Image (cartoon, rainbow, N blue to C red):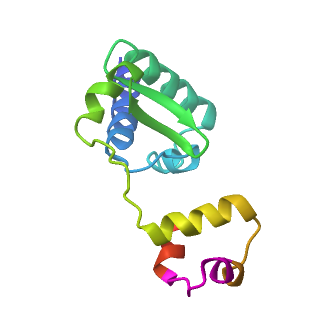
Amino acid sequence: MREAETIAEMKSILEVALLTATQPLPIDELLKLFAGRMERATLRMLLDELRQDWAERTLDLVQVASGYRFQAKAEYADVLARLHPERQPRYSRAVMETLAIIAYRQPVTRGDIEQIRGVTVNPNVIRQLQ
C-alpha cells in the first residue's frame, strides 16, 4: 500500500511543478524534483499517467520541443482569446514605406532604403520591424 501512496505523491509533485511552471519543463529538470531517486522510464510512465488523468479535464499535458507543459484544450481557445485580444499594430507611414522597400527589393541594406526614400532611416523604424 505504501508504494501506491508514493506513486500518488510523485504524480502530485509532477502535477504541481508542471502547473506552476512558467515554461515547459524538460525531463532533466523534472528528475531534479526527486533528487536522483527516479529513473527516466519511471518518470515517463508517470507523465503518461498524468496525461491520462487530465484527458477528460480542461487542460492537456503535452510534450513540446523544450519539455512538458500543461496547456488549455483547443476547444477553449476562442473563449480564452477574449481575455487577451490581439490588436493589429498600427504602423507609421515611414515604417510602411520601409517595409515595402524591404519586401520589394530584398536583400536590402539600410543605405539602400535611405537612398530610395530620400531620408535617413530612423533606428526606431528598423527596431520596430525587427
Is residue 11 shown to the viewer in this render?
yes
Please state which of residues 117 and 126 is positioned toward the viewer in this rendering.
Answer: 117
| Residue 15 magenta | no
Q: Give the total of numbered labels.
A: 0
Q: Is residue 92 left or right of residue 116?
A: left
Farthest-out residue, top: 56
At x 40% / y 37%, what residue is drawn? 14
Please state which of residues 73 and 69 is positioned toward the viewer in this rendering.
Answer: 73
Is residue 130 shown to the viewer in this render?
no
Farthest-out residue, right: 107
Quarter of the image for the N terminus: give it. Answer: top left
- Which quadrant of the view contains residue 120? bottom right
At x 32% / y 26%, what residue is drawn? 78
At x 54% / y 39%, what residue is drawn? 38
Farthest-out residue, bottom: 120
On the image, the x and y values in percent for residue 17 come to 36, 43
On the image, the x and y values in percent for residue 80 come to 28, 32
Q: Is residue 25 left or right of residue 22?
A: right
Quarter of the image for the C terminus: give it. Answer: bottom right
At x 57% / y 38%, what residue is drawn? 64
On the image, the x and y values in percent for residue 90 come to 37, 58
On the image, the x and y values in percent for residue 117 come to 60, 78
Please state which of residues 87 and 102 is positioned toward the viewer in this rendering.
Answer: 102
Q: Relative to residue 127, is residue 34 depicted above or below?
A: above
What's drawn in magenta, residue-wise?
A: 113-123
Q: Is residue 109 left or right of residue 58?
A: right
- Which quadrant of the view contains residue 54? top left
Q: Relative to residue 60, is residue 98 depicted above or below?
A: below
Q: Is residue 33 left or right of residue 59?
A: right
